[in-house]
Amino acid sequence: MKKALVAYFSISGVTAGKAELITKIVGADTYEISPKIPYQAKDLDWENETSRSTLEMKDLDCRPEIAMPVCDMEQYETVFVGFPIWWFREPSIIDTFMESYDFSGKTIIPFATSIESPIGDTEKRLREICKGTPDWAEAKMLTGFDETKIREWVESLSL
C-alpha cells in the first residue's frame, strides 16, 4: 500500500475515533488538524449568532490558522481528510488545510461525521479549493460505521 496520512479535525472526539480506526486499518500516519487558537465551549454554540464557529461558517472566505503544519507532506501518496459537518459543510479549518499543500499526484479521500446533516456538496467545495491536481475518492459519511464497516469501506477503495 502507498504511504498514507489520516488528517482530521475533531472537537467532540467522534471524527477522531473514526480517524483512529482508519489509521489502524490502513497502517497510516495520523495528523490532527488543530487551530492555532483552540476552540472554547462558547465558540461552538451554533445557536449564538456571534459565536466564533457561527461567524466562521457564515464567511466562506474564513481560514482559521492551523497550529502546526504536517511534517513532510511530500512523503504521502494517499491523504484521508476527516471532519464533522458543520452548517451542512466542512469546517473552515478544513478549507485552510486543503489550501495549505500541493496535493498533485496524491489521492484525497474525504470522510465526515455528523449527528444529522448530510455530506451534501462538501466534496465539490473541497475539489474547488484544493491546491494541485490530486485523484479523488468519493467523500464518505462515516456516522454509524463501526470498525467492520470502516474496514469494508477502506478495502473497497483499492489502495
Image: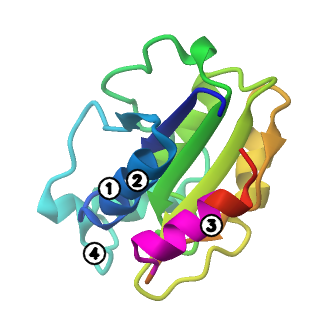
Frontmost of labels 3 and 1 is 3
Horizontal side, residue 138 vs residue 2: left or right: right
Say whether disc 2 or disc 4 marks the residue closer to the N-terminus.
2
Magenta span: 145-154
Q: How far apart are marks 3 and 2 (CA)?
A: 13 Å
- Residue 157 percent location from the top left of the image: 73, 56
Secondary structure of the residue carrying tag 1 is helix
> Pointer 1 and pointer 2: residues touching (CB < 8 Å)?
yes
Mark 2 packing: few (<14 Cα in 10 Å), some, or many (20+)? Answer: many
Outermost residue, bottom side = 116
Q: Distance between the residues labelled 4 and 1?
A: 25 Å
* Residue 150 inside the magenta-drawn segment: yes
Q: Name the residue under label 1.
A: 16
Mark 1 packing: few (<14 Cα in 10 Å), some, or many (20+)? Answer: many
Q: Which amino acid does label 1 sit on?
A: Ala
Above or below: residue 104 compared with residue 30: above
> Pointer 3 and pointer 4: residues touching (CB < 8 Å)?
no
Secondary structure of the residue carrying tag 2 is helix
Secondary structure of the residue carrying tag 4 is loop
Q: Mark 4 points at which residue?
A: 48
Above or below: residue 141 compared with residue 126: below
Asked if residue 87 can be seen in this view, the reply is no
Label disc, if present, on residue 153 of the rendered structure: 3
Q: Name the residue under label 2.
A: 19
Q: How far apart are marks 3 and 4 (CA)?
A: 37 Å
**Which residue is at 72% across, 63% downward?**
156
Mark 4 packing: few (<14 Cα in 10 Å), some, or many (20+)? Answer: few
